[in-house]
């Protein structure tokens, strides 16, 4: 049971950091998760709720990325910059800053 709790705790923290962010102004999300697990980690209902929330959070962001990949009617410049930045970073490069007058 404790290994399952640890896995769910690790998964939900990883999902919150990945999809919400880990900046200082967003740290209350991870603080809340840590607080809830430290206080009520024995409740089976809370563990199932945390597992379901992790699944929901990951699914929503996967769905959003899928919609972007299908070229829905949104501006994709930021998403393309992110993809190109990841590609450049994978080979040790950085994209140059774009000059805007």
Image (cartoon, grey):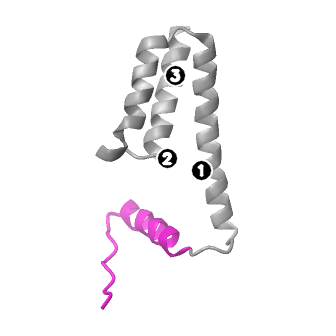
- Residue at image point 41% right, 46% down: 21
Instruction: Judge whether 62 appears above or below 48 on screen.
Output: below
Q: Is residue 74 left or right of residue 2?
A: right
Query: Which numbered marker is on residue 7?
Result: 3
Q: Gap in Å between the C-alphas at discs 2 and 3?
A: 18 Å
Picture quadrant of residue 66: bottom right
Picture quadrant of residue 71: bottom right
x%, y% of residue 56?
64, 39
Instruction: Judge whether 20 appears above or below 36 on screen.
Output: below
The residue where tag 1 is placed is 61
Q: Which residues are magenta?
A: 76-101
- Sequence-first disc among 2 and 3: 3
Residue 91 visible somewhere in the drawing: yes
Query: Which numbered marker is on residue 19?
Result: 2
- Sequence-first disc among 2 and 1: 2
- Sequence-first disc among 3 and 1: 3
- Residue at image point 35% right, 39% down: 27
Nearer the observer: mark 2 or 3; the answer is 2
Q: Is residue 63 left or right of residue 36?
A: right
Q: Gap in Å between the C-alphas at discs 2 and 1?
A: 7 Å
10 Å crowding of disc 2: few (<14), some (14-19), many (20+): few
Q: Are marks 2 and 3 in contact (CB under 8 Å)?
A: no
Q: Considering the numbered disc 2 on the image, is that residue within a helix, a strand or a loop?
A: helix
x%, y% of residue 85?
41, 67
10 Å crowding of disc 3: few (<14), some (14-19), many (20+): few
10 Å crowding of disc 1: few (<14), some (14-19), many (20+): few
Q: Are marks 2 and 1 in contact (CB under 8 Å)?
A: yes
Q: Considering the numbered disc 3 on the image, is that residue within a helix, a strand or a loop?
A: helix
Nearer the observer: mark 3 or 1; the answer is 1
């Amino acid at each position: 049971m404790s290994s399952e709790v640890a896995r769910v705790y690790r998964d939900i923290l990883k999902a919150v950091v990945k999809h919400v962010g880990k900046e200082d102004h967003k740290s209350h999300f991870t603080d809340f998760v840590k607080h809830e697990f430290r206080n009520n980690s024995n409740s089976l209902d809370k563990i199932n709720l945390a597992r379901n929330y992790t699944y929901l959070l990951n699914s929503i962001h996967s769905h959003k990325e899928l919609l972007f990949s299908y070229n829905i009617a949104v501006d994709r410049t930021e998403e393309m910059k992110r993809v190109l930045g990841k590609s450049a970073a994978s080979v040790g490069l950085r994209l140059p800053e774009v000059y805007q007058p």
